[in-house]
Image: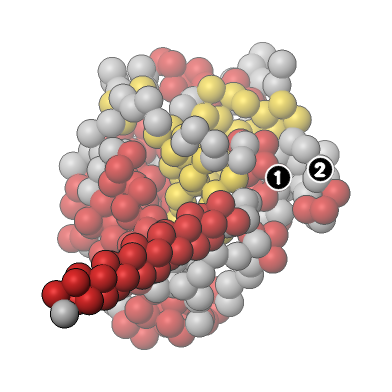
Amino acid sequence: MKRHNKARKATELLAVIILASAILGACAENVQKQKIPAATYMGGKASITGICRELDAAGASHVDLFQEWVVDFADSAGKNAKLEDAWSDPAKMKADIVKCMDGWEQNHDYSDADCRMTAFLLLDGMLCSESTESNYTGTYLMFDTEAIDNVDRYEIIKKNRDMFTTLYGEKRVTEGNSPETVFSDSWKYHGFQINSDRISLLSIVIYDPYSEVVFVGHTGILIKYSDYYLFVEKIAFEQPYQATKVHTVDELLNIMSLRAEYFGEEGEAGPFVYNNGEYIGTLKKNIDMAEKIPYNRSK
């Protein structure tokens, strides 16, 4: 009888081991089959938790506060716009911006964050400079500074307001200088650097030929892995957060080229792309991802 019970227990144990192995194998297979490029608006718990776990592991700052911001957006603007808690083909993603705005404004009486504020939060403590410009009087960051100065949730950014406006504010293109060199020159002049071997700041800089200035029109943080990159951004005020996984930076910039709002009139210079202040190329309007139109990489 005892021998029979031992055999039965051994059989049950073997079955448990086989089942566990099958589950682990299936999980591993699903990870391997995850398509890249892929993107998510972080519309729910699963995607938000996963991205925040990756941010934390890479050493990003204030991930807990970032998570509060994303959850708040998902539960208000995101829910109203029915943003999915899933990964999708980034070329086919399109959020209902009007419903996002309506959903946010129904639940808040203060400004939402934008791309610059979000990246600055996640880089707090890693991003440093040797000098800053005080008393920003420009107009291109007026909505950013209004939010930073008047909303308590942005207190961390307010503590480094001068660094924020020095980094992102408009820079004049002086006679004899090319527009694409101005942002890099400012980065070097003020001694900006990011103390991380995995995280960098990707910036899209717009040239305004009428005012003869350049300014950071969009930005986000780029995290490097052994076989892919993760780009985390807030698309704009009252627009979704987005995380995108790509094989290469070129692939990411092809995706960014789908956004018409970064482009001026035909023939105008830019938009210019920088990684930690280093000019890496100029976006070219990409109407169809299938065509794989590359951006102009600098030599």
Q: Is 211 placed above or below 285 here?
A: above
The location of residue 49, given as percent across then percent down, is: 33, 62
Tell me what residue is drawn at x 49 percent, y 45 percent: 230
Q: Is 77 placed above or below 272 here?
A: below
Q: Is 243 placed above or below 120 here?
A: below
Asked whether 242 or 22 is in front, the reply is: 22
Q: Is residue 255 visible?
A: yes
Quarter of the image with the N terminus in it = bottom left
Residue under pointer 1: 254
Circle 1 residues within 10 Å: few <14, some 14–19, many ≥20: many
Task: For mark 1, give the secondary structure.
Answer: helix
Real-space CA distance between mark 1 and mark 2, rounded to the nearest whole angstrom:
7 Å
258 sits to left or right of 241 = right
Q: Earlier in the sequence, mark 1 or mark 2?
A: 1
Tell me what residue is drawn at x 37 percent, y 80 percent: 76
Q: Are marks 1 and 2 in contact (CB under 8 Å)?
A: yes
Mark number, residue 293: 2
250 sits to left or right of 169 = right
Q: Amino acid at mark 2?
A: Ile
